[in-house]
Amino acid sequence: MSYGTIECQVYVLTLDCRDHVARPHRASAKAALAEIGSLSLEFTRLAQLTKDDKYYDAIARVTNELEQLQDKTNIPGLWPLHVNAQGCAKYTPSRNVGTPMRQDPREKGRASSITSATTTTATRKPVAVPTDLDSYLRLIQRDSSIDYSQSEPAVYNHGGSQAQGDFTTADKCDGGLELPVSQRDNKYGLGALADSTYEYLPKEHLLLGGVTDQYKKMYKKAMDAARKTLLFRPMMKGERDLRFTASTQSLNPETKDMPTSSQLVYESSHLHCFLGGMVAVGAKAFGIESDMELASKLTDGCVWAYEATNTGLMPERFRVLPCDQDRTCEWDEVRYEKEAQRYFSVLDSEAQARFRTGESAYGQRVKMNSDNKPQEPGQNGVAVPLPMPGSLNPHDEDPLYKRDSFAVGRAASSPSPLPSLAVGSDSLENRDASRLPPSPALSQTEGNERRDRLPAGMASISSSEYLLRPEAIESVFVMFRLTGDNYWRVKGWKMFEAIVKNTRSELAHASVKDVTSQKPTQKDTMESFWLAETLKYFYLLFSHPSVVDLDKYVL
């Protein structure tokens, strides 16, 4: 199936380009880092399957450029979220885009061959699609006779001549990758726009069998830089020792000083949750055993973000407060309230502290809201409370809602039994509860989670959606496979219960609008990665370790 898909994609790309064959193609001056770095695994595996070196050569050139740029950035070792991939010293786009350019002599005959290909599409024989595991293995057989011991990264010719004919500028576009043209694009982080570039460094090393240490060097540089600048411990109640990563504001490319704390943004996201698994894989692949503890703390940070909300689902993006010092990180209520106040507002300023800490009852909060805004009539003449400030109304579809009909948090609901899965002699049921970290502390006293929809530790929630993302459970799965610690299965099962409870619909599973709500509303969307990744990692977490053995496969 994979082979047929690849054939189809290449063919479609050829068709799309037939009208532009005589025009030069330039990459973007504002290319997302992940768009470039995410090609490594796919092209390398394609080269292995097809035994055609051109695919590996193509991605090796990109990797060489990333390696050269890695030491020239504001944070040496890390890349900006956007890079200038045009390779031109000065780019002057053609304004007369409607007039075809003079055809490159080397392109003669290509257009006619493409036209010929398009006319024969209907007569092409379909690719035989595998129907089971045996037929798949017969289709894509591993060639163990290939000797990769002498393999080396492709050499990129920086001083080469201009590759294409008439350009609209005399500048040669063979300069490789550069920092973004605009300072506002010169930001750094490990989440969105950058994530898979970093994630694939250790995975590419494994896929290549370690025949080159290029990806190993690049990974170690990136991790050293991340530890020094972006990794931090958040301030938490209950002294739970977690780790998150920050991102930077726009940095001046001319200034090579490390970013200060004022230039860092302490916002985490679900997309950041791949980091725990990445660090764990890197720790094992490169012998950095001390990083296994860091991987555990990064993964546990995402587990906490799931547990902290009313629904048991992690919000898409949220802000936390960094500890002043890593070793002494005591909860500071005053500092927390001051930070939360920057992003949170209510109608009654005098009640703000009570509103935030949950000291005011839920009914008082509704009254505080209704005193300032008229209520909307509901069914049977019952007035429906308006939405709480900054959030969706948890019961806007149920005018007969009563507080006591909902369980406090998740503890009052009847939990589904954990599956009896054992590793060695330590089953989930027999797991020593004292080894599990305490549940996330609520903002005030036990049982007030339903009163305060902003969990303690989260200074604000930038996006309260849950989009069925796979990153958190991927890291939980990797941590279990690499440590054998059933703690990760316990946490993964709780995550699965919360997800199924809140996302299941008549047809499939839907994204959730607001994870802080007592009665969350579903969105009319289900992203493809729910089936392709999220469910896959849940399945593998509770499968025997021989299923997709990580010593044999790169996921």
Image (cartoon, rainbow, N blue to C red):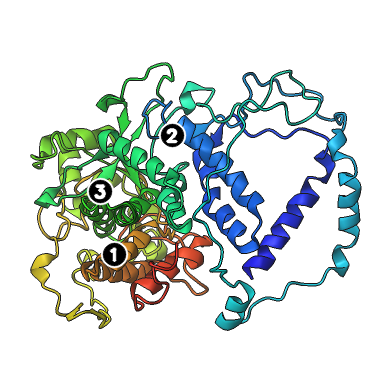
Secondary structure beneath dot 3 equals: loop
Q: Which residue is mark 3?
A: 454
Whichever of labels 2 and 1 marks the residue nearer the N terminus, that label is 2
Instruction: Say if 59 sits above or below 139 in the image.
Output: above
How far apart in space, not on screen, are marks 3 and 2 (Cα)?
33 Å
Tell me the kind of residue under disc 3. Leu
Query: In the rendered structure, which amino acid carries the disc numbered 1?
Result: Leu
Label placed on residue 261 = none
Q: Quadrant of residue 411?
A: bottom left
Answer whether labels 2 and 1 touch (C-beta < 8 Å): no
Q: In the rendered image, which quarter contains the C terminus?
A: bottom left
Quadrant where the N terminus is found in the figure: bottom right
Q: Position of residue 25 (x, y in %)?
A: 72, 35
Q: Nearer the viewer, mark 3 or mark 2?
A: 2
**Of callouts 1 and 3, the N-terminal one:** 3
Q: In the image, what residue type sits under mark 2? A: Trp
Answer whether residue 386 is visible to the viewer in this image. Answer: no
Image coordinates of residue 62 in percent, x first then y, are 56, 40
Q: Measured from the top left, where is residue 101 in percent x and y? A: 85, 29
Label 2 crowd bin: few (<14), some (14–19), many (20+), radius 10 Å: many
In this view of the protein, can residue 61 be seen by the observer?
A: yes
As helix, strand or loop, the secondary structure at mark 2 comes to: loop
Q: Earlier in the sequence, mark 3 or mark 2?
A: 2
Report, in whole angstroms, how far the alpha carbon at label 1 lies from the one at label 3. Answer: 34 Å
Q: Nearer the viewer, residue 148 or 168?
A: 148
Report which residue position mark 2 lands on.
79
In this picture, residue 124 sits left or right of residue 457: right
Which-is-in-front pick, marks 1 and 3?
A: 1
Q: Quadrant of residue 97?
A: top right
Q: Measuring from the top left, give residue 536's x and y in whole percent.
A: 44, 69
Please name the residue that numbered disc 1 is placed on. Answer: 482
